[in-house]
Image (cartoon, rainbow, N blue to C red):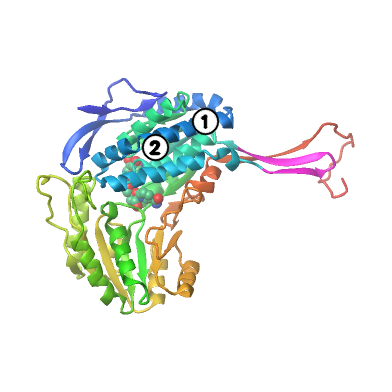
Amino acid sequence: MDLIRHWIDNKPVASEPERKGKVYDPATGEITAEVAFASVADVDLAVNSAKDAFVAWRDTSLTKRVKILFAFRELVDKHLDDLAKLLTSQHGKVINDARGEVQRGLEVIEFACGIPQLIKGDFSENVSTDVDSYSIRQPLGVVAGITPFNFPAMVPMWMYPIAIACGNTFVLKPSEKDPSTSQLAAEMLAEAGLPDGVFNVVHGDKVAVDGLLTHPDVAAISFVGSTPIARYIYETGTAHGKRVQALGGAKNHMVVLPDADMDLAADAAVSAGYGSAGERCMAISVVLAVGDAADTLLPKVQERIDDLTIAPGDTAGAEMGPLVTQAHLDRVLGYVDAGENEGATLVADGRGFSVEGYENGFFMGPTLFDNVRPDMSIYRDEIFGPVLSLVRTDSYADAVKLINDNQYGNGTAVFTNDGGAARKFQNEIQVGMVGINVPIPVPLAFYSFGGWKDSIFGSHAIYGPDGVHFYTRQKAIISRWPDPVHRGVDLGFPRYDN
Ligand code: NAD
């Protein structure tokens, strides 16, 4: 059986790991590979490799860094289908969605290729006689990324292309559930000419994560995952003196006003609720139907659910694949039981679903609840599966209050044909990313991605301009050249007259 190894100093680690994890094909339920779990010593090896590489990499010219990034961009583009296939085989998402994921990652690499422009400082000439004042942005050192299972190619790409472009060296700890795309990325970075030690991968669990969080030579941590772990990463990382950005979970609401285009809203609710089997941090989990909107919307949603093709991700025409693991499937099915017991109306029941020939796969059908109330667990918790809840609200104000009172603030959307209502929503909603007639408002690579409230810990969103700021620190310089004027000792603060 294949063993997925750590990648340190531009090569796979040769020694046998003491601990290993299992990697499944979610469509068949079979174990397809094993993955090495890092010990504290493995983490140390990776961080030391990154620390050694930093000395030369931080002084490598911007033009050289950009050449390597361009070469990497070409390789990712060339191997897009290989990455997508790997992703489907370990995550389960359908192949078109997997391709889309890699393309979104590619856009961040393309953004990072613009680093000479992005990293520019400011310069003010003659702030005083013969004195210039300027600022530069410098890399932090060794930075680490810890990433979730649901976007095994894209989320790491939110981090390392920009971190490396800024002159840092990187240690990635991808999800142990679908680790292979990181390995392929490491091989492509090496082929693109990235020097040894600039990009390293350690696989594993809490041992690896804690090793990074407490390592004295790790300057910063980027994390994307669930909220309890994000909070832990932020608290532990900052307590150890690191700069931390930790993006957490979500419970995204989509408001449908009575004047909305109901076909557009139904398409959006189904696409955003069941795409990638609901395993997206920007998935729509709750539809808030205002006034009588539900009466028109519900049958349209139902119709579309009935038409969905659920099949292994590599099957032609598949729209929704399996969930990532049996344990996750069981957890999601548990929420369907809970919703029924708590009194919500089960409109579409995804339990007991199986695909012929794939009876051991981690499949369930799309599930839809109507008449969901805010006190129910299916409303409160992030389910992260193909379960959509319809909540009926009397007014726009009630809908906004529900969203603003929610623990999470990752994404939200409003569907309406009233520009004034949309503008009011955009202004008063307490959420980081807002869609107007767009269900999944993920910012493009040249903006930054980040929620509010318990969906993020730390002051920097990820990628885009915030990414450059997160992976660099500013240095301010004041210089007097070339001919210092000898004015003698002056103990006062600089004044306007000098
Ligand atoms: P997770 O929090 O279980 O795992 C994320 C990472 O943390 C993995 O690398 C995992 O190995 C590690 N980890 C898990 N438990 C740990 C522990 N006790 N101590 C230290 N490290 C630990 O998340 P997941 O299940 O892989 O991913 C799904 C979650 O990620 C969802 O909550 C989803 O909303 C969130 N997510 C958020 C965003 C965002 O941008 N806000 C994007 C994608 C996913």
Mark 2 neighbour density, 10 Å: few (under 14) some (14–19) many (20 or more): some
Q: Report if the CB atoms under discs 2 and 1 are less than 8 Å apart.
A: no
Question: Does ligand 1 reach within 8 Å of label 2's beta carbon?
Answer: no
The image quarter in which residue 5 lies: top left
Going by the numbered disc 1, the residue's amino acid type is: Lys
Residue behind label 1 places its C-beta within 8 angstroms of ligand 1: no
Mark 2–mark 1 Cα distance, whole angstroms, equals 15 Å
Between residues 324 and 212, which one lies in front from this camera angle?
324
Can residue 20 be spotted in the picture? yes
Q: Which image quadrant: the N terminus?
A: top left
Instruction: Give percent across and percent down for residue 167.
Output: 54, 33
Q: Which residue is mark 1?
A: 67
Q: What residue is shown at x 27% (from left), y 45% (from top)? A: 95
* Nearest to N terminus: mark 2 or mark 1: 1
Residue 494 placement, left or right of 340: right
Residue highlighted by disc 2: 77
Local secondary structure at mark 1: helix
The picture places residue 304, in percent across and down from the top left corner, at 23, 64
Res. 220 in view: no
77 relative to 166 in the view: left or right: left
Q: Quadrant of the C terminus?
A: top right
Q: Which residues are magenta?
A: 122-137
Q: Position of residue 478 (x, y in %)?
A: 74, 39
149 w.r.t. 190: above or below: below
The numbered dot on residue 340 is none
The main secondary structure of the magenta stretch is strand
The structure residue drawn at horizontal position 16% and vertical position 62%, both measured from the top left corner, is 349
Q: How many marks?
A: 2
Furthest residue toward top: 14
Residue in the image at 50% along x and 23% along y: 52
Q: Neighbour class for label 1 at 10 Å: few (<14), some, many (≥20)?
A: some
Q: Amino acid at mark 2?
A: Asp
